[in-house]
Amino acid sequence: MEALTSREFVLRALAAAEIAESCTRPDLRQSFFDLSEQWLSCAGAAADTASAGDMGAMRPSA
């Protein structure tokens, strides 16, 4: 299975937030907002990993 990019995590977070906005039950609303936060956290981690990989590629070889 292919790893998700930070962009894909952000899109999932936006979808979860959109669903949360339409929920009339407070418990479901909160669950979708929590899911959105988790996806955004994953997006940040994926971006950090990608940045670290880019920096590693820029290092001169010994």
Image: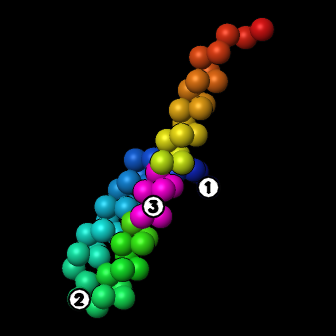
Residue 9 in view here: yes
Mark 2 is surrounded, within 10 Å at the Cα level, by few (under 14), some (14 to 19) or many (20 or more) other residues, namely few
Amino acid beneath label 1: Met
Label 2–label 3 contact, CB within 8 A: no
Q: Which residues are magenta?
A: 37-43
Question: Could you give the CA–CA distance between mark 2 and mark 1, rounded to whole angstroms?
Answer: 35 Å
Q: Is residue 33 left or right of residue 43?
A: left
Secondary structure beneath label 2: loop
Mark 3 is surrounded, within 10 Å at the Cα level, by few (under 14), some (14 to 19) or many (20 or more) other residues, namely many
On the image, numbered disc 1 is attached to which residue?
1
Q: Is residue 23 left or right of residue 3?
A: left
Q: Which mark is residue 57?
A: none
Q: Is residue 24 above or below residue 35?
A: below
Q: State which mark lies toward you, 3 or 1.
A: 3
On the image, numbered disc 2 is attached to which residue?
24
The spot of residue 37 in percent (x, y) is 42, 64
Q: Is residue 12 left or right of residue 58?
A: left
Question: Could you give the CA–CA distance between mark 2 and mark 3, rounded to whole angstroms?
Answer: 22 Å
Question: Which residue is located at x 43 percent, y 70 percent?
Answer: 35
Secondary structure beneath label 3: helix
Label 3–label 1 contact, CB within 8 A: no
On the image, numbered disc 3 is attached to which residue?
39
Question: Which residue is located at x 62 percent, y 55 percent?
Answer: 1
Q: Is residue 43 left or right of residue 59?
A: left
Q: Earlier in the sequence, mark 3 or mark 1?
A: 1
Q: Earlier in the sequence, mark 2 or mark 1?
A: 1
The spot of residue 26 in percent (x, y) is 30, 88
Amino acid beneath label 3: Trp
Q: Earlier in the sequence, mark 2 or mark 3?
A: 2
The spot of residue 34 in percent (x, y) is 42, 72
Pick the residue in front: 50 or 37. Answer: 37
Name the main secondary structure of what is drawn in magenta: helix
